[in-house]
Image (spheres, grey):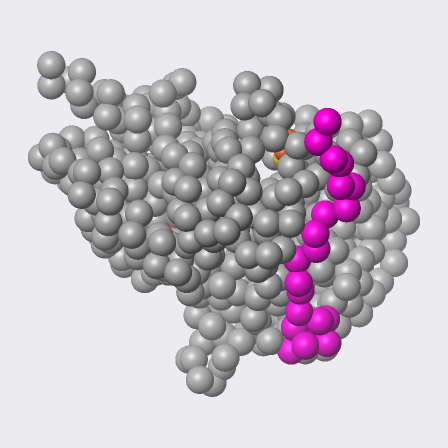
Amino acid sequence: MPRLIRERVPTPERSVEERVRDFGEVNLGYTWELALKEAERCLQCPKEYAPCIKGCPVNIDIPGFIRALRENKDDPDKAVREALKIIWASNSLPAITGRVCPQEEQCEGVCVVGKVGDPINIGKLERFVADYAREHGIEDELLREEIKGIKKNGKRVAVIGAGPAGLTCAAELAKMGYEVTIFEALHEPGGVLIYGIPEFRLPKEIVKKELAKLKELGVKIETNVLVGKTITFEELRKEYDAIFIGTGAGTPRIFPWPGVNLNGIYSANEFLTRVNLMKAYKFPEYDTPVKVGKRVAVIGGGNTAMDAARSALRLGAEVWILYRRTRKEMTAREEEIKHAEEEGVKFMFLVSPKRFIGDENGNLKAIELEKMKLGEPDESGRRRPIPTGETFIMEFDTVIIAIGQTPNKTFLQTVPELKVDKKGRIIVDENLMTSIPGVFAGGDAIRGEATVILAMGDGRKAAKAIHEYLTKKNN
Ligand SMILES: Cc1cc2nc3c(=O)[nH]c(=O)nc-3n(C[C@H](O)[C@H](O)[C@H](O)COP(=O)(O)OP(=O)(O)OC[C@H]3O[C@@H](n4cnc5c(N)ncnc54)[C@H](O)[C@@H]3O)c2cc1C
Ligand code: SF4
């Protein structure tokens, strides 16, 4: 019987005192020695049964990559090369997913060791492999091998949106020999990875290096192109053999509370775009300003709310999360909630805004909050918040609204023949093909707000489906 080690090897983290003063990464990741020690804890469940593989949305051979580390103890470069090959077979952006996947709900949530102790730290091991490979030139070496094997097939595919769905779809198609062009509305590719998730969780340098791989595979990225305006969908259809839509769900959901247009109230999307994409935290070195007052309220309990709260804290404010359910129902990653708590974000549960109160100059000065109680579970399986009628007032000078995002209607309206559901999500069949033949879609554009790995999984699946579609069409 393999020896069971209940406690996981911790990953070093920067101290709270140091990290709240800057936007540098909080978790420092494993060293080779620590990674190996953690890898030794895995019980190596047989591949056919390993629950972690089933728990991973793209079914990475987790015991396989962990074994590659263990079997090459004396040669870390070889260990990482073999492990990365296994990971790349299912996931092209492991430095990103290792950092942002909600592992506790996926692979780690079902790891057998988790039943009696801490599950294997799969996310941090995946991140270690990707980081070590990048830093030691192993990734470049494997990429060159991959590029050598590409045979161009002369067919062209357009990808709309450079988020994880579009990027993954493009990478997979390029490997199959397609000429791929991604059209991206913003001035930088990456989608939420670049404008939403802050540096302290996902350094932009890492995202950029992951994206540099795409260029080497021959993918063209045209930024500052808003499909539907800069170029029409019809023009793309004429020029390309197939299209993949990965436009995400970037429109903030804003409830029409009285006073919601007062100065000092941001959508999380605007706040995080200013801070992350435009680097407003480095103002005036960068041109874009961001204003936060002394007391900031963030409305919501997801990853976006945690990111907004921790960013505001780093800009010097006292920050409150105001959430209408309890901690148990929060959808943010457990690690982020823990980090936010450690850093001094204050949490108030079972409250919901009733109205925002301004001063004579139109600036926010307080929120009237209503106390909530929990009722029966709703369609998300979480207990529904019910208003109690009891209200109170709390003073705040800034509010960040993080109650969700929906797909962008402006683009969808330019393509009326594209079928969407009531929530604006593009309707697709089991091959991710939309109502228009040859046009595929994936990621948040079909799911609404979901996760990075699901978007990547869709990108991969759509690439295969596009390949099959074009192969059949030409035979
Ligand atoms: C703040 C925040 C934190 C998050 N944290 C996590 C996390 O920790 N873990 C996790 O798994 N998930 C997290 N998520 C969710 C995750 O980021 C998304 O599920 C994922 O990015 C969806 O990928 P996508 O490629 O479908 O869309 P997106 O990442 O939204 O990318 C869509 C891209 O399409 C572009 N685009 C849109 N319309 C057009 C057009 N008409 N023409 C050209 N380009 C267009 C957009 O500019 C954008 O770059 C977070 C989301 C947010 C907002
Ligand atoms: S379930 Fe846990 S112990 Fe089993 S193979 Fe996966 S990581 Fe290892």
Q: Main secondary structure of the magenta part?
A: loop
Q: Is residue 105 above or below residue 136?
A: above
Q: Is residue 474 above or below residue 211?
A: above
Marker count (numbered): 0
Name the one closer to the observer, 102 or 128: 128
Tell me the quarter of the picture where residue 56 sits.
Answer: top right
Q: Position of residue 352 (x, y in %)?
A: 77, 50
Q: Is residue 296 above or below residue 407?
A: below
Q: Residue at x 61, y 30 (%)?
A: 44
Name the one closer to the observer, 116 or 59: 116
Q: Is residue 433 above or below residue 455?
A: above
Name the one closer to the observer, 38 or 335: 38
**414 relative to 133 in the view: left or right:** left
Tell me the quarter of the picture where residue 164 sits.
Answer: top left
Of the four image quadrants, the one with ligand 2 is: top right
**239 relative to 69 in the view: left or right:** left
Q: Position of residue 59 (x, y in %)?
A: 50, 29
Q: Is 10 a magenta residue?
A: yes
Observer able to see residue 210: yes
Tell me the quarter of the picture where residue 232 sits.
Answer: top left
Q: Position of residue 157 (x, y in %)?
A: 20, 36
Q: Residue at x 50, y 79 (%)?
A: 282
Q: Is 270 a magenta residue?
A: no
**437 relative to 407 in the view: left or right:** left
Magenta segment range? 1-21
- Please, which residue is most extreme toward the front here? 74
**135 relative to 59 in the view: left or right:** left
Quarter of the figure with the C terminus = top left
Q: Residue at x 85, y 44 (%)?
A: 372
Q: Residue at x 71, y 71 (%)?
A: 15
